[in-house]
Amino acid sequence: MSDSARTTTRTLDLDAYLDRIGWAGERRPDAATLRGLHLAHLRAVPFENLDALTGSAPSLDLADLTAKLVHGRRRGGYCYEHNTLFAAALEALGFRVTRLAARVVVGADRFEDRPRTHMALLAEAPGDPRPYLADVGFGAIGSLLEPVPLTADTEFHDAGRRHRLAHAPHAGPLELWVLEAYEDRGERPGSGWVAQYAFTLEPFERPDYEVINWHVATNPRSPFSRRPYVQRLTPDGHLLLDGDRLTATRADGTVTERKLTDEAEVRRVLARDFGIDAPEGLRLPG
């Protein structure tokens, strides 16, 4: 066990974390446990950027994350928070975890135009030759619901969603991996594979994420510092609050959207539909 894993084991309240996500299954470092934990985390803990809207960057200290996402119950977080916590839980269970930084490329003409602002994970189980891309913190409908093996050009069906990994050309010495999601627009035109983010396997460390986290949360040009962005899985699909617009996407691709009328309604939706208590000092539209 690495020094970082030993530190994680001492500081993470693993029982409380597993209770928070509703996991009563095995605690073995294997692929089945990894898939189960990943989906359970996503179903239990919402994605949200509300701390950034109070003018501060959220803490990535494990004790603070445990207080907010585990013991707090009525809060979520964004990628650095989710994946820092999830990595700690995996290491406490005996997985080896490499922390990665990715370029979010949804809608980008060139991958190089996007900075590395997303945290993802590579998880390895003892005795399993396949590493897995794991990510419980990607704030998009194209996110992984379960981890997928790091294998190119193979389609994976993860809890009802469709993903694949591909290689893309680039100037660096390391292979560039791209996570793609199949976007099913139902009766609307445009269904097909959509690139979500691109990454190499270079490991990143806590100080790297501290810098990126501060930039994303406090830069006035960052979308996360300007409007609420909240999502959660529902029994029938996916729910997104982007600013004052609420979008529900069903598993069959059906989309319904409505504009919230004022700040009071935004707060009601956060509490009722996302299970989130707004933090003190939160600025909301309306």
Image (tube, rainbow, N blue to C red):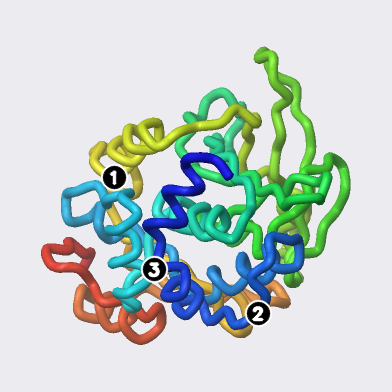
Quadrant where the image shows the N terminus: top right
Identify the residue at image location x=37%, y=67%.
76
Secondary structure, mark 3, is strand
Quarter holding residue 216: top left
Q: In this figure, which residue is indicated by the disc labeled 3? A: 245
Q: In this figure, which residue is indicated by the disc labeled 1? A: 217
Secondary structure, mark 2, is loop
In the displayed structure, 160 sits above or below 220; it is: below
User: Is residue 225 shown left or right of residue 242?
Assistant: left
Residue type, label 2: Gly
Residue type, label 3: Arg
Identify the residue at image location x=39%, y=68%.
245
Quadrant where the image shows the C terminus: bottom left
Identify the residue at image location x=67%, y=71%.
36
Q: Residue furthest left?
A: 281
Q: CA distance from mark 1 to mark 2?
A: 35 Å
Quarter holding residue 174: top right
Q: CA distance from mark 3 to mark 2?
A: 37 Å
Q: In this figure, which residue is indicated by the disc labeled 2? A: 25
Secondary structure, mark 1, is helix
User: Is residue 285 shown left or right of residue 132?
Assistant: left
In the displayed structure, 224 sits above or below 34; it is: above
Q: Position of residue 131 (x, y in %)?
A: 75, 45
Whether residue 268 is visible, yes or no, is: yes
Identify the residue at image location x=85%, y=53%.
155
Whether residue 139 is visible, yes or no, is: no
Residue type, label 1: Ala
Which is more N-terminal, label 2 or label 1?
2
